[in-house]
Amino acid sequence: MIETPPQPTETPVEIEIEPAPRDPRKIRWTRRRRAVAGFWRVYRSSRMGMVGLILLGFFILMALTAPLIVSPQDIGVIDPPGEPFQPPSLEFPLGTDDFGRSVLDLVIWGSRISLLVGFAATVMTMTVGAAVGIAGGYFGGRTDTVLNAFTNWFLVIPWIPLAIVLASILGQSLFNTILVIGITSWAGTARLVRADTLSVKERPYVERARALGAGNWHLVSRHILPNVMPVIWANTVLTVALAILAETTLALLGLGDVTKPSWGITIYEAFSAGALSAGLWWWLIPPGVCICLVTLSFTMCGYAMDEVLNPRIQER
Amino acid sequence: MSVLSIRDLRVTYRTKGGDVPAVRGVDLDIDRGHVLGLAGESGCGKSTIAGAILRLHPAKTAIEGQIELDGKDILALKPGQLRAVRWTGASIIFQGALHALNPVRRIGDQIVEAITVHKLAGAKEARVHTAELLEQVGLPGRRIDDYPHELSGGQKQRVMIAMALACNPSLVIADEPTTALDVMVQAQVLRLLKNLQHELGLAMLFITHDLSVLVEVADRIAIMYAGLIVEEGPAEQVFRSPEHPYTQALAGAFPAIGDTRFRHRPSGLGGDPPDPQQIPSGCPFHPRCAAAIDVCPSLDVELWEAGPQRRAACIHVAGAPTLTETAT
């Protein structure tokens, strides 16, 4: 409990106390609502951000509603709805593949898998990268030397060979694809976060907080992390794009799970069935375009968010 | 009873370029309700002492001597105990308020932080107390949810003062609290500090390079040079009639408004403070001293009596040993 400060010896001054603050939880929520509104106001002014967001919204909606549009049976290879290699028609707007599945169905269903891999791998990358980066940057010394060496090691290993080896050891499944992308991509984030942590921890307010009697956990969670967060956020959005591309690469190399028709898998199947030489463009191009658009939308959102979230580059 | 008692404090920074003795044997005492002013040029070790009281220096910095805060031996505390003493035993009003506040967190939260870190109150209670503290330093309580960038320099310094009072510390260390402020705001902040000190009966260590500021707020003044205290005494006397040539130079560097003599003869002190790694032998001030005599380069100076309640580390003061004595 707070003791009242020693009473004034002479000339007591009347301290006017503002009307008792309301319930802190209510205050916190009002603040949050206001913060989101403020974020939206600035974000909206970025044309690039808005285009990216609309595009992204479209694909996320597609992924969420896919089970309503496409029945899982239609994308199975047993009893497919059409004849193989049919060019676009009214019944199959994007034609059919070598089994006779509708390419449109595959593309719609593929958005689920591609986005899932993108988000899941990113969560992994960010968690590991931020933890390693902050730990190394904040504690310094031997911890930093070890973690930094570890990070650099992962950074210089060419990721495709590592991913191929890992994928073949772990086996082909969606979870392993996510794991492989996570393992091979956290190092860049860790470096970025470490560099930012190094600069943040030298700020006077960190020393002030230490003088306040704050412990390491408090310093990291209340002072370092919030100031490093803009870097992490902006990086997150860009990493989702990279993770989706990585998934495509792995799938194209035949390391994906063919029972989960992501966009990458569809391209892989089209490619190995000779769609390129046979001129089956309707099979190859739509998933490719989807990958391009999703990656682009994440990148555009990422840049726009960086402008809004990073208080240091915000214009006032 | 003294709140803070420092005996023979020595702080040595370990750097790649070798050891840097920043403080070389300092004694200080601050009584409850008293303000001690600590003055000197940049790099003379003032802020190093402030940091040593809360042990804020990097772990490898060597701190010797004794620091007693509220009867607790600071240098013997374990990390957990040390954290408990920080801010509740002594708090700091930092030099640059502009940078000592986290830009991405609301000022209220940062004051509440001080209270909740020490579990002195729950979040709700701490918030009420924070609003009171803000009112106490002359900021409307509704500004509790402002971000640092929404405040002016003077207001930020007021926030820092409120923060320093948050845990009712026994000692407040004001480390150049008015440095980055313009003169008008400086005066306001000083008045506020002085009033609060008076009302709350705070013990305060006031660090600055501005002697004229110290005369306003301090009861006693200690002047530092090259990691040592070279003069110490009641504030008014030290400022009006300094004994040590260094203090004379510091005091002489301030213009006396309206004094025509000063207008024609502004005085200053030539040269730079010595590099802590190459401190001159004998009296460290002798290379820059106008009153230096032959023995100064080889004389081990200490604080000699220089009048009632006054001491100075100069061969010319009344209590200094006679030259024949030192020669033997």
Image (cartoon, coloured by chain):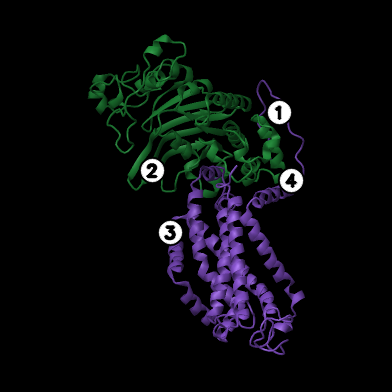
Chain colours: A purple, B green
Report whether residue B252 is seen.
yes
Label 4 vs label 3: CA separation? 43 Å
Question: Which residue matches tag 2?
Answer: B13
Task: Identify residue type, mark 4.
Answer: Ile
Question: Could you say which disc has been placed on residue A15 in the image?
Answer: 1
Q: Secondary structure at mark 3?
A: helix
Q: Are marks 3 and 1 in contact (CB under 8 Å)?
A: no
Label 1 vs label 4: CA separation? 23 Å
Label 4: how many Cα within 10 Å (few below 14, some 14–19, many 20+): few
Is residue B270 shown left or right of residue B149?
left
Label 3 vs label 2: CA separation? 20 Å
Q: Secondary structure at mark 2?
A: strand
- Image location (x, y in percent) of residue B252: 39, 18
Q: Are marks 1 and 4 in contact (CB under 8 Å)?
A: no
- What chain does badge 1 belong to? A
Is residue B134 shown left or right of residue B255?
right
- Image location (x, y in percent) of residue A308: 61, 50
- Image location (x, y in percent) of residue B284: 31, 29
- What chain does badge 4 belong to? A
Tell if the residue under mark 3 belongs to the same chain as the one under mark 1.
yes
Task: Identify residue type, mark 1.
Answer: Ile
Q: Secondary structure at mark 4?
A: helix
Question: Which residue matches tag 3?
Answer: A142
Tell if the residue under mark 2 belongs to the same chain as the one under mark 4.
no
Please tell me which residue lies in front, A68 or A138: A68
Question: Which residue matches tag 4?
Answer: A27
Label 1: how many Cα within 10 Å (few below 14, some 14–19, many 20+): few
